[in-house]
Image (cartoon, rainbow, N blue to C red):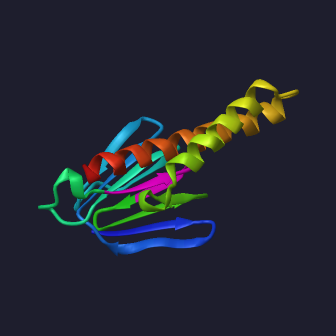
Amino acid sequence: MHLQLITLQGVRVDQKIYELIAPTADGEIAIFPGHEPLVTLAIPGALAVRHEKADRDEQLEYFAISGGVVEVNPNAIRVLVDEADHGDDIVEAESRAALERALQMRDEAKDSIELDQARQLVDRHMVRLRVADLRRRQRR
């Protein structure tokens, strides 16, 4: 099956895969070749890609994604999101510091707009830290 992961900056992934695990509003879903057609909302979370059927869980490729849309056809998946950071590109210490700043922004928000912006940043950096943790565990 073919995966396209598309962000506001362009195409991040455009290749053949075996399985995609995606965070959706209804929970995580696993998508395999021949999946029924589906369009669903993606929520911020870890997107996991299994390239070959025989790949072990330790070989999954991870992306920290923002919310968006997942479109599934029997032979193709298109994931449209604002951001998708590859697990290898996330620097855990930087994300941890950014999360602390976002939490401080949330606590000091003066109105609903500032609070919403801070919550989005908190979600983003929590997801990035989760993906960084998954990558660290794979390397052990």
Give the x, y percent position of residue 81.
56, 57
Give the x, y percent position of residue 76.
34, 67
6 horizontally vs 29: left or right: right
28 horizontally vs 58: left or right: right
Q: Which image quarter holds the N terminus?
A: bottom left
Say how many tags the image has. Answer: 0
Give the x, y percent position of residue 12.
49, 70
> Farthest residue toward the left?
54
Inspect the magenta stretch and tell me whether residue 62 lies in it. yes
Q: Give the range drawn in magenta.
A: 61-71
Q: Which residue is drawn at 25% across and 66% down?
A: 51
Magenta stretch prevailing secondary structure: strand
Q: Which of 29 and 63 is in front in this view?
A: 63
Give the x, y percent position of residue 73.
34, 62
| Residue 42 visible in the shown view | no
Question: Residue 59 appears in which quarter of the rendering?
Answer: bottom left
Q: Which residue is drawn at 26% across and 56% down?
A: 35
| Residue 58 visible in the shown view | yes
Q: Nearer the viewer, residue 102 or 31?
A: 102
Residue 38 vertical position relative to residue 111 in the rendered view, above or below? below
Question: Residue 121 appears in which quarter of the rendering?
Answer: top right
Q: Which residue is drawn at 35% across and 48% down?
A: 136
Inspect the magenta stretch and tell me whether residue 140 lies in it. no
> Farthest residue toward the top?
107
Q: Nearer the viewer, residue 24 or 105?
A: 105
Residue 121 vertical position relative to residue 20 in the rendered view, above or below? above
Q: Nearer the viewer, residue 63 or 139?
A: 139
